[in-house]
Amino acid sequence: MSRFYVSPDKVGAGEIIVNGPEARHILDVMRLKKEDKVVVFDGTGVEYTGFITKADTRGKKLVVEIICTKKPAADSMPEITLAHAIPKKAKMEYIVEKATELGVSNIIPLVTDRTIVRPDESSRLSKSERWQKIAVEAAKQCGRTNIPEVKDVAKF
């Protein structure tokens, strides 16, 4: 069964409203239709199982009726923060993905004295948003119900 992410504000009483890129992924890529069963999580540790009740393929919006809510038991693992110097090329994306899969709670990209990649202010925001998106995708893939927070680039 497919897992999808929505922000906590999209979860209402008995239903979830999915729109934007996630709705496009459900309707166009996965080709799910009305009455298909899906699992949705909101990043706060809660997982919802339900059926698609309304699907608007043109407006890229759908409604999921919640039939079951699960809050998995709290992990016995400690909260782990990974502070890592930014490597060259796309290696940081790989680090964020694998750290998410391993259960890291926070990721802090660092600029150190020997760091070659030094993002300026505009690219810092875009890189942080990209890394957070990768963390969401990795959480969907590996079955986590919470999403690690990728902090802003910091100096060591």
Image (cartoon, rainbow, N blue to C red):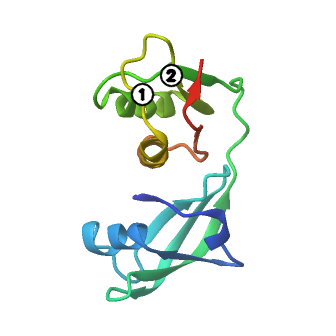
- Name the residue rendered at 53%, 62% in the picture: 40
Q: What mark, if any, has residue 118 been given in the picture? A: 1
- Name the residue rendered at 45%, 32% in the picture: 96
75 displayed left or right of 154: right
Q: Nearer the viewer, residue 56 or 64?
A: 56
Q: Nearer the viewer, residue 38 or 5?
A: 5
Q: Position of residue 122 (x, y in %)?
A: 45, 47
Name the kind of residue labelled 1 in the image. Answer: Arg
Q: Position of residue 3 (x, y in %)?
A: 45, 57
- Name the residue rendered at 46%, 81% in the picture: 62
For residue 23, above or below residue 49: below
**In which quadrant of the rendered image does the N terminus lie?**
bottom left
115 displayed left or right of 7: left
Q: Are dots 2 and 1 in contact, CB under 8 Å? A: yes
- Name the residue rendered at 37%, 21% in the picture: 87
Q: Position of residue 67 (x, y in %)?
A: 61, 72
- The residue that disc 2 covers is 111
